[in-house]
Amino acid sequence: MTGTGAVAGAPKVGVMLRHVTAPGGVTVFTRRVVRWLLTHPRGVEYHLLYSDPSQREVFADLPGKHVVLEDKARLRWDQVTAPRYAEEHGLALLFNCKFSVPLAAKVPTLIVIPGREQLAMAHVFPWYNRWYNRLLVPAFCRSAGALITHTEIGREDCVMMGARPESITVIPHGVDPYLRPAPEEAKRALKARLGLTRPYVLFLGGITPLKNIGNLLRAFARLAQSHDVDLVLAGFKRWSFERELAPIAELGLQDRVKYVGYVPDEDLAALYSAAECLALPSWYEGFGIPIVEAMSCGTPVVTSSGRHAAPEVAGGAAVLVDPADPASIAAGLSRVLDDPKLRAELVAKGLVRGPQFDWDVTGRRTAEVIESLVARPQRREGAWAAVKRGVVRGTASASAVVTERIAGGFYKK
């Protein structure tokens, strides 16, 4: 055994983790899956690659080789710094949970792509990200040795972006085992701590244009005229959050909409369980973790119809609404609030559906993909591979400072 807990001579797998302290569903998947891999190495030596020393804290209690490759330029880190480390240290695979892989590495690559939200909803992203997504996300799909996505609609999206169908494995998210119906005492304590005095409809997620907060607020303005409920917005602020939250004042909802910010994991079961329902009328979901988390806590779900993951993940256990129509959203919420029979049916279905998503299964299936890739003999490079690699890395290095300056503040605006 080595100091990392791996068997000597074991295949080495690098996990790219520069995003591991950023908020969002991708990070939830990353933290749960990587923790599972590190506690079940199954003969693999994992190298955890960070871009900043502070990121080491996330998995500091776990075995594995923890490596800080300091580089503030994200494009250069992905395309030059991480793959160079992989080549110099004999890694058999580079794995990134956040839709980016080296385009010209000698080392095989595995990438996670939830769907094509960056292209299907390009207009809601800042201009810099529209350019990056249009140019590079399809390139990542084409160049990755293998892809993981979370739904069948995600598989279709990856193929639309150029991935080979045989290279794609569908692995859903899981639900943490502590997300189950909370006792009344825990619900009362949380509501008191957050100052929630009325029954409430819950939104949980990033405050971004993708989540359709504006139409949710317009729908709630209709609902509030006839229902004594508040709307609780829980989650982190991302780009354009000021514009997304502007209708609160425009519609005179300051006393009925409560923004409570980020809620820690230990409070989530009580937050979900105390809610009258979850409202997630997103324009696009790559999976929609709150859907299955709320179901696991016995909370009815109202989410959006359309061509994205939410209807598939809901699996017939939620009310689906038109995200483009505030009246449809309001009607869906009203049905759940006013129809006890429907509510009981949704709760029962959700309590079956939600716990079907298991992080142990997610971790094990991810490990199986990794093991199958490191067992393959590596293909010999073509004559032009070194030239392509030099061009990609030279371009990434030359443009890194400029692109980082342009992208600065992306999550703050």
Image: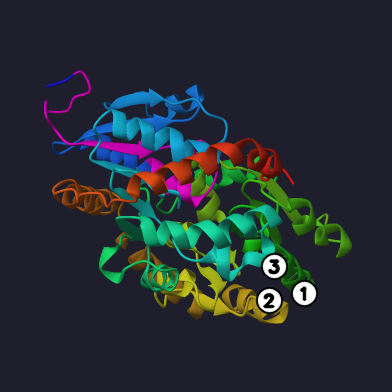
Cβ–Cβ below 8 Å for labels 2 and 3?
no
Q: Which residues are magenta?
A: 3-31
* Disc 2 residue type (three-letter): Ala
* Disc 1 residue type (three-letter): Arg
Answer with left or right where residue 208 lies relative to residue 181: right
- Residue 288 can be seen, yes or no: no
- Which tag, 1 or 3, sits closer to the chain's start? 3
Residue at numbered disc 3: 216
| Residue 222 tag number | 1
**Camera-side residue of 312 and 352:** 312
Which residue corresponds to the image point at 43% horizontal and 37% vertical from the top-left?
A: 17
Which residue corresponds to the image point at 40% horizontal and 44% vertical from the top-left?
A: 389
Cβ–Cβ below 8 Å for labels 2 and 1?
yes
- Residue 313 can be seen, yes or no: yes
User: Height in image: 243 above or below 235?
Assistant: below
**Camera-side residue of 117 and 400:** 400
Q: Dot 2, how many residues are within 10 Å of its Cα: few (below 14), some (14-19), or many (20+)?
A: many
Q: Give coordinates of residue 146: x percent, y percent.
A: 30, 57
Answer with left or right where residue 361 lies relative to residue 182: left
Which residue corresponds to the image point at 69% horizontal and 38% vertical from the top-left?
A: 405
Q: Secondary structure at mark 2?
A: helix
- Which tag, 2 or 1, sits closer to the chain's start? 1
Residue found farthest to the top: 3
Residue at numbered disc 2: 330
Quadrant of residue 9 within the rendered picture: top left
The mark closer to the camera, 1 or 3, is: 3
Q: Give coordinates of residue 112: x percent, y percent.
A: 39, 54
